[in-house]
Image (spheres, rainbow, N blue to C red):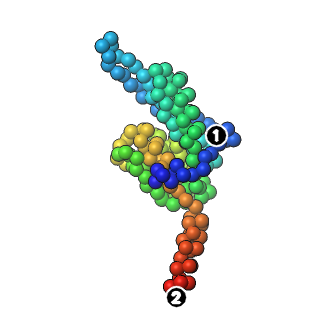
Amino acid sequence: MAKESISRSKIDASELALNDKLVYINRVSKVLKGGKRLSFAALVVSGDGAGHVGIGVGKSNEVPEAINKANAVAHKHLIAVQMAGNTIPYQVTAKFGAAQVLLKPAAPGIGIIAGGSVRAVVEAAGIKDILTKSLGSSNKTNVAKAVMLALSSLKDPKKEMAKRMGSEKPQEATGG
């Protein structure tokens, strides 16, 4: 699945009106001879609310610097999310590390049934109705990356059916 998201065309962040949302800041300490040295890791979700979303992790000795780095990474790694109205076209699961997520389409008016980093990613993508379940690890970074994998694996059902129907016809013609 990871190779699929890499092979897709790049999305230019400068053309989109992106909203950045800070999901999590992790304070990390390293013990040295002279005492503890603190640094910070920031997880940021960036999206335009119309089918484009990206996540980024930035690390630095200062919080604002870590957030700026995370924003830059999120803008670089944007993906286009396949949507069916205000929801996703079909149920999908994805796993990143020990974190696994389940995303299911929901009827109009249900809203976003999600929590934590799943909610942040889904809202940034512009999905209005979805049912989600986070399984396994609750690590916010890995859960967010699992959601991104799930969203990047979505394909347009009509195009996929056309591909499948197109690939079956020549086989039938030669087999008969």
Residue at horizontal 59 percent and vertical 38 percent from the top? 75
Q: Residue furthest front?
A: 174
Q: Observer-nearest residue: 20 or 114?
A: 20
Where is residue 48 drawn, in percent x and y?
A: 63, 42
- Report whether residue 113 is seen: no
| Badge 1: residue crowd in 10 Å (few <14, some 14–19, many ≥20) | some
Left or right of 88? Residue 18 is right
Residue at horizontal 69 percent and vertical 41 percent from the top? 15
Considering the numbered disc 2 on the image, is that residue within a helix, a strand or a loop? loop
Q: Residue furthest left?
A: 33
Left or right of 131? Residue 31 is left
Q: Quadrant of residue 35?
A: top left
- Report whether residue 50 is seen: yes
Question: Is the C-beta separation of discs 1 and 2 under 8 Å?
Answer: no
Considering the numbered disc 1 on the image, is that residue within a helix, a strand or a loop? helix
| Badge 2: residue crowd in 10 Å (few <14, some 14–19, many ≥20) | few
Residue type at mark 1 is Ala
Where is residue 128 drawn, in percent x and y?
A: 58, 50
**How far, Cα to Cα, is label 1 from label 2?**
51 Å
Q: Residue furthest right?
A: 15
Residue type at mark 2 is Gly
Checking the image for residue 13, the label placed there is 1
Report the mark closest to the observer, 1 or 2. Answer: 2
Left or right of 149? Residue 28 is left
Q: Observer-nearest residue: 158 or 120?
A: 158
Say whether disc 1 or disc 2 marks the residue closer to the N-terminus: 1
Look at mark 2 in the image and give the residue it sits on: 176
